Image (tube, rainbow, N blue to C red):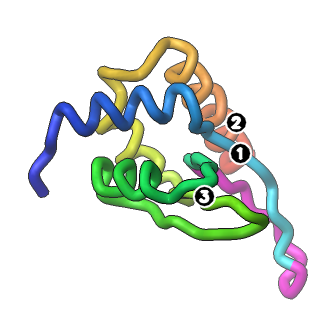
Amino acid sequence: MIINEIELAWAAGFFDGEGCTCFWIQKNRFYNRKYGRIRVSIAQKDRFVLRRFLYAVNTGSISFSGGKYQFYADGLEKCQIILILLWKFLSPIKKNQYREKLKIFIDWRTE
C-alpha cells in the first residue's frame, strides 16, 4: 500500500468536519448476548468524497440508505488503522472524541 500524505491530510480534514467515532451496544436476539460496537463513520449525499476517503485510508465500506451514502468502518482494528493514519493531521477535538469512545469501548469489554 502506498501512503499518500496529501490524501491523508485531506481525509483528516474531511473527517474532522464531517465524521464521527461512535460506540453503541447491540443485542444479539438469538443468543441473548450484548456486544459493544465501535465505528468510524461519515454520511454524505454524494458518494464521490466518501470514495476518496475510502481510497485514502484503504479500509471500510460505503453503503446507501435513507437517501444518503455512509462510509463506515466497524470494529477496533479498522478504527485503529484509520485513526493511526490520520492522527497527526486531526484536530484535538477529534482526537479526544476517539479517545473517549475507545475508553468506553475498552471499559465495556473488560466488565
SS for callout 2: helix
| Label 3 residue SS | strand
The residue tagged 1 is 23
Three-letter amino acid code of the residue under disc 1: Phe
Q: Which mark is residue 61?
A: none
Q: Earlier in the sequence, mark 1 or mark 2?
A: 1
**Mark 2 sits on what residue?**
104
For the residues marked 3 and 1, what is the alpha-carbon distance in whole angstroms? 16 Å
User: Label 2 is placed on what type of residue?
Assistant: Ile
- Residue 13 x/y as whole percent: 42, 27
Residue that mark 3 sits on: 70
Q: Residues within 10 Å of mark 1 (few under 14, many from 20)?
A: some
Q: Which residues are magenta?
A: 29-39
- The numbered mark, 3 or 2, whose residue comes first in the sequence reads 3
Nearer-the-camera pick, 87 or 49: 49
Looking at the picture, does residue 75 appear above or below residue 65? above
14 inside magenta stretch: no
Q: Residues within 10 Å of mark 2 (few under 14, many from 20)?
A: some
Instruction: Residue at 46%, 53% (x, y): give it.
Output: 50
Residue drawn where x is 63% and y is 32% of the image:
103
Give the secondary structure at mark 1: strand
Image-quadrant location for residue 23: top right
Query: In front: mark 3 or mark 2?
Result: 3
Check the image and report above or below for 95 versus 68: above
Residue 28 placement (x, y as % from top left): 83, 76
- Quadrant of residue 5 within the rendered picture: top left
Mark 3 vs mark 2, CA separation in Å: 23 Å
Front: mark 1 or 2: 1
Residue 19 drawn at (x, y percent) = 57, 38
Could you tell whether 110 is left or right of 111 in the image?
left
Disc 1 and disc 2 in contact, CB within 8 angstroms: yes
Residue ID at (61%, 39%) = 21
